[in-house]
Image (cartoon, rainbow, N blue to C red):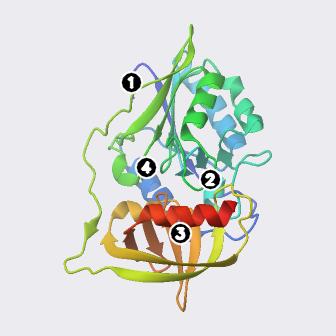
């Protein structure tokens, strides 16, 4: 972050009121990142469960910053076009809904709620898995629309990742080092698309265990999804998914997009747009043919 700005980092937290069962599997990214940033040399992170919480944090930061513009990072779980705050812990929440808005998305009510901070923020980074992706294969969502919306409302540069993230993507000063796509604001032309900023340091890739062999998971049921689909309710869903066991730290922190049930087994979570699965006991798999899986899920949700 530039020294001419006042840095603000905000991390998702559980809502004070419990709206349903909390999802314990969402903790790794939040806990590990919070621990790392608190131990680092950067600003102490704030916490927010909702957009109304963000409003309080930003209002306080503007007073502390005096004449400096804010450089804001908001960290939570994500899918294309949505940064999940308190919703990270509530699997039944698919979008921001009504106030207090547990997600940062293109809901006009929550977006306009942030308009009072126009002119105070020079750059906004929405940091969650795949938040900046242009599209999501199985749902009508767009990271590009989200960035454009907030760029237009706040009249500042807005950035988001186009890949999975973890605490490894933050340096000892709390700055995000992963790859980001951004939209800049021009007073003359409004929001203008910018190039992708590459990662400033390399990140480990998924590793296949020596001798790992393909296996097939027989799925018999949809359990739930955080995607904004027409019908997220549990129902039969039969498909076979060929996978290869892998290990990758980012999968432990990844957003659980869809929950499926394995025949005569436990649940598995679809992450990174169907490219990987994570088991209920932490098992990690790379999907051999992700396009086939996403096509089957699209048919399930929209046929």
**Label located before the other in sequence (2 or 4):** 4
Distance of mark 1 from mark 4, alpha carbons?
20 Å
Mark 4: few/some/many CA within 10 Å (<14, 14-19, 20+)? some
**Label located before the other in sequence (3 or 4):** 3
**Label located before the other in sequence (3 or 1):** 1
Q: Residue at x 41, y 52 (%)?
A: 165
**Label located before the other in sequence (1 or 4):** 1
For discs 1 and 4, the disc positioned in front in the rendered view: 1
Q: Which mark is residue 38?
A: 4
Q: Quadrant of residue 248?
A: bottom left
* Callout 1: SS: loop
Q: Are marks 3 and 1 in contact (CB under 8 Å)?
A: no
Q: Residue 75: image x %, image y %? A: 52, 46
Q: Residue at x 62, y 64 (%)?
A: 299
**Label located before the other in sequence (2 or 1):** 1
- In this view, the residue farthest toward the left is 210
For discs 3 and 4, the disc positioned in front in the rendered view: 3
For the N terminus, which image quadrant? top left
Q: Which mark is residue 2?
A: 1
Distance of mark 3 from mark 4, alpha carbons?
22 Å
The residue labelled by disc 2 is 139
């Amino acid at each position: 972050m530039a020294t001419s700005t006042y840095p603000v980092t905000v991390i998702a937290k559980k809502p004070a009121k419990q709206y349903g069962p909390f999802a314990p599997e969402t903790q790794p990214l939040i806990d590990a990142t919070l621990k790392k940033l608190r131990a680092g040399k950067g600003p102490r992170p704030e916490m927010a469960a909702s957009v109304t919480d963000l409003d309080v944090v930003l209002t306080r930061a503007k007073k502390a910053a005096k004449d400096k513009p804010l450089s804001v990072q908001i960290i939570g779980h994500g899918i294309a076009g949505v940064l999940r705050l308190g919703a990270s812990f509530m699997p039944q929440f698919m979008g921001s809904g009504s106030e207090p808005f547990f997600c940062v998305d293109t809901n006009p009510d929550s977006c306009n709620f942030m308009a009072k901070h126009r002119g105070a923020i020079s750059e906004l980074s929405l940091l969650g898995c795949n938040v900046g992706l242009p599209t999501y294969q199985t749902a009508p969502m767009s990271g590009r629309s989200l960035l454009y919306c907030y760029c237009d409302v706040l009249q500042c540069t807005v950035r988001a990742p186009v890949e999975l993230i973890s605490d490894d993507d933050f340096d000892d000063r709390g700055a995000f080092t992963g790859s980001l796509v951004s939209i800049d604001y021009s007073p003359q032309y409004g929001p203008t698309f910018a190039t992708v900023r590459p990662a400033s340091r390399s990140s480990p890739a998924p590793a296949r265990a020596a001798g790992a062999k393909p296996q097939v998971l027989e799925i018999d049921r949809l359990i739930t999804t955080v995607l904004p689909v027409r019908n997220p309710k549990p129902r039969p869903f039969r498909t076979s998914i060929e996978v290869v066991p892998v290990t990758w730290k980012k999968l432990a922190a990844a957003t659980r997009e869809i929950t499926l049930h394995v025949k005569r087994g436990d649940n598995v979570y679809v992450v990174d747009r169907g490219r990987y699965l994570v088991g209920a006991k932490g098992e990690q798999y790379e999907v051999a043919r992700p396009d086939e899986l996403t096509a089957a899920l699209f048919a399930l949700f929209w046929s």
